[in-house]
Amino acid sequence: MAVYISEGRGGELIAKITGEIDHHSARWLRSDIDTAISDKSPEKLVLDFSGVSFMDSSGVGLVMGRYKNMAGRGGTVRLVNMPDYIQKVMELAGMDRLLNGKE
Amino acid sequence: MNKKALNEMKLSFPSLSENERFARAAVGAFMSQKNPRVDELNDVKTAVSEAVTNCIVHAYRDSVGLIEITARLTSEGIYIKIRDRGCGIEDVKRAMEPLFTTLPDEERSGLGFSVMESLCDSVSVKSLPGSGTAVILTKRLRTKL
């Protein structure tokens, strides 16, 4: 499990997550992403799930937390490259509205 | 071994968060004997991860205790019991409501049981406050063509 942070166009911060997201790994991912948000103060956060091989509802909590963090700063969150089996869990929480630019 | 079981396994491990991955991987490896489809394998691993996380986060919140998993492969599919001897659940019906969580500050989504119900064919929860909780999951499996 790791998260790779980069900066995109238009004030975007891109966090590419790799590996498995569960309760154990979510705390480290949360810390790394929030540190990058504090350092870079982005207008938009993009969470890239292309490298995620497993996710349970801890991933939903991770997204909800980052959404609150960014909303508190007047920013937005977008989820990209989400495999179908992970999208299934996101849809249960209604988080799929953040998918592919529907901020 | 249970009479209806084609194969059975039992597993016990301490309620350390490092073991969430181990638990779902072990059940997934056991289940793979039946050549499940990839989506069935993902569904079961996710449901097991939710149940084991509940044991770690809620049942043994301020302690470390044993989590026991019994899994059986039958001619129809898989039966999995996840058992703890932790604090138990006062109100099971309420705990199973979508988005209900006692730990919103820890970014728990309150979707654990909803995910289990969505991905399995049946979810049964038996709990006694002070004694522990047993979650039983069943899922029919279609043999891979």
Image: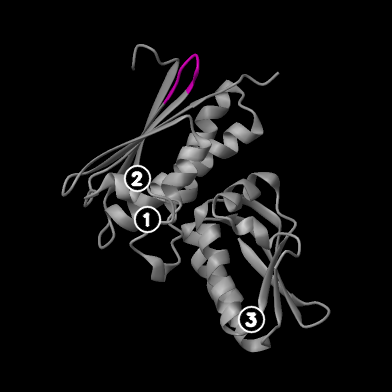
Q: Is residue B15 left or right of residue A95?
A: left
Q: Secondary structure at mark 1?
A: loop
Q: Looking at the picture, which amino acid does disc 1 mark? A: Leu
Q: How is the image coloured?
A: one colour
- Mark 3 sits on what residue? A36
Left or right of residue A47: residue A67: left
Task: Check whether the beta carbons of the residues at disc 2 and disc 1 lie within 8 A of each other.
Answer: yes
Front-most of residues B22 and B99: B99
Mark 3 or mark 2, whichever is nearer to me: 3
- Residue under numbered circle 1: B16
Give the residue displayed 35% in from the left and 57% down from the top: B57
Asked whether the beta carbons under mark 3 and mark 1 sit within 8 Å of each other, the answer is no
> Going 60% across and 58% down the picture, which residue do you hit?
A95
Residue B41's place in the image compared with A70, above or below, is: above
Position of residue B126 measured from the top left corner of the image (x, y, whole percent): 26, 37
Amino acid type of disc 3?
A: Ala
Spot occupied by residue B12 in the image (x, y as percentages of width and height)? 33, 40
Relative height, residue B14 to residue B104 (above, below): above
Residue sitting at 71 percent across and 56 percent down? A51
Q: Chain of mark 2?
A: B
Q: Amino acid at mark 2?
A: Phe
Measured from the top left, where is residue A62 in percent x and y? 54, 65
Q: Which residue is mark 2?
A: B13
Q: Is residue A76 visible?
A: yes
Callout 2 and callout 1 share a chain: yes
User: Is B32 colored magenta in this rendering?
Assistant: no
The chain containing the residue under callout 1 comes to B
Q: What segment carries the magenta color?
A: B72-77
**For the residue carrying disc 2, how many other residues have a C-alpha within 10 Å: few (<14), some (14-19), or many (20+)?**
some
In 3D space, how far apart are the residues under numbered discs 3 and 1 (Cα atoms)?
A: 28 Å
Quadrant of the rendered image containing residue A17: bottom right
